[in-house]
Image (cartoon, rainbow, N blue to C red):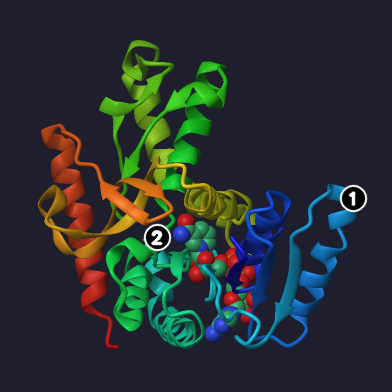
Amino acid sequence: MNKITVVGAGNVGATAAQRLAEKELARQVVLVDIVEGIPQGKGLDQWETAPIEGFDTRVIGTNGYAEAAGSELFIVTAGIARKPGMSREDLLNTNVGIVKSVAQEIKKCAPDAMVIVVSNPLDTMCYVMKEVLGAPRKRVIGMAGVLDTARYRAFIAEALDVSVEDIQAMVLGGHGDTMVPLISYTTVSGIPVTQLMKRDVLDAIVARARNGGAEIVAHLKTGSAYYAPSAGAVQIAEAIVKDKKRILPCAAWLEGEYGHRGIYLGVPCKIGAGGLEQIIEVELTSNERVALGKSAQAVAESIAQVKL
Ligand SMILES: NC(=O)c1ccc[n+]([C@@H]2O[C@H](COP(=O)([O-])OP(=O)(O)OC[C@H]3O[C@@H](n4cnc5c(N)ncnc54)[C@H](O)[C@@H]3O)[C@@H](O)[C@H]2O)c1
């Protein structure tokens, strides 16, 4: 790609910009934030790592969107993050306004761009972005399932003392307490995880993955996770840039899939140069279907609160 813009030069955005540059996913990475000096300073600092890390991606920080014009892809991380005791839903009112204003800018400077949304509450912010952009669903994708799945995979690998690379898993549903780790599709190099691990240990891992964001917030106290979230956003970006056709759990706008429509929800997606190229419907156990229904209900209630 020629240009990728990251909106929000905070913890997630700045780390994502650095990862994009190190992977050389575009000629130019533009970092946009409203705080004067922060994107400029971070962008320059990152560009100065180029000779050491050996990448030619030019990183530029700015407070406006002129430099972002014509970007093929945006990663939107603008907004406030959680503090201890806050749920993702507590961010709703503030972040609706922020994501709406970012969407209006994207519409002006790069109306055909693809957008990966990271700001929370994730599924609702994806809805705001899609509505304001007036974009088809293939161009607005949310990053949450990749992160939730990474946490789940990391905990399983740790418990079994095996490589994280050999854990295949999917966490579906909304990005909140109602997320749905699919135990029936969790394998270790193809071996069902239930053959290798006692159910109570697995249940504890599921609970820890669900609570994974809050666990980090409790440690950090002043903000929320960003290394794994930025890696998740960049994994989706890489699938688009390299047209990898990866099957990743992403938040996608449902039009009847899994029995739901008119909401964003985490489902298995094929991600390539066309953005969201396909939603893959897998069979679910009755428990998983009920859990996904509850998750969809929670997202629908959150979206219902949005006044654009
Ligand atoms: N989807 C996920 O899995 C996931 C994971 C982690 C964090 N998040 C969310 O991502 C968001 C960012 O988290 P963070 O840790 O980077 O927060 P942060 O506070 O470090 O950074 C947010 C940045 O957004 C900027 N900003 C605010 N309004 C803006 C606007 N209108 N235009 C441009 N920039 C603006 C702020 O100045 C700040 O620099 C939060 O909403 C957080 O909850 C989502």
Residue 52, which numbered label? Answer: 1
In the rendering, at what x and y percent does residue 9 appear?
Answer: 66, 72
As measured in the structure, the alpha-carbon distance from the residue carrying label 2 to the one carrying label 1 is 32 Å
Q: How crowded is mark 2: few (under 14 residues within 10 Å), some or many (20 or more)?
A: many
Does residue 82 appear in the picture of this structure?
no
Residue wearing tag 2: 142
As rendered, which of 252 and 25 lies closer to the eye? 25
In the rendering, at what x and y percent does residue 71 appear?
Answer: 55, 73
Q: In which quarter of the image is the C terminus?
A: bottom left
Q: Is residue 37 above or below residue 187?
A: below
Local SS, label 1: helix
The amino acid marked with disc number 2 is: Gly
Query: If the picture is divided into quarters, which one holds ligand 1?
Result: bottom right
Residue at left offset 79%, top offset 57%:
56
In the rendering, at what x and y percent does residue 141 appear?
Answer: 38, 60
Residue 3, which numbered label? Answer: none
118 horizontally vs 121: left or right: right
Local SS, label 2: strand
Residue at left offset 31%, top offset 51%:
277
* Disc 1 C-beta below 8 A from ligand 1: no
Indicate the quadrant where residue 305 lies. bottom left
In the rendering, at what x and y percent does residue 149 appear?
Answer: 43, 40
* Mark 2 / mark 1, whichever is N-terminal: 1
Q: Quick check: marks 2 and 1 in contact, CB under 8 Å? A: no
Residue at left offset 49%, top offset 54%:
214
197 horizontally vs 24: left or right: left
As rendered, which of 232 and 1 lies closer to the eye? 1
* Disc 2 C-beta below 8 A from ligand 1: yes
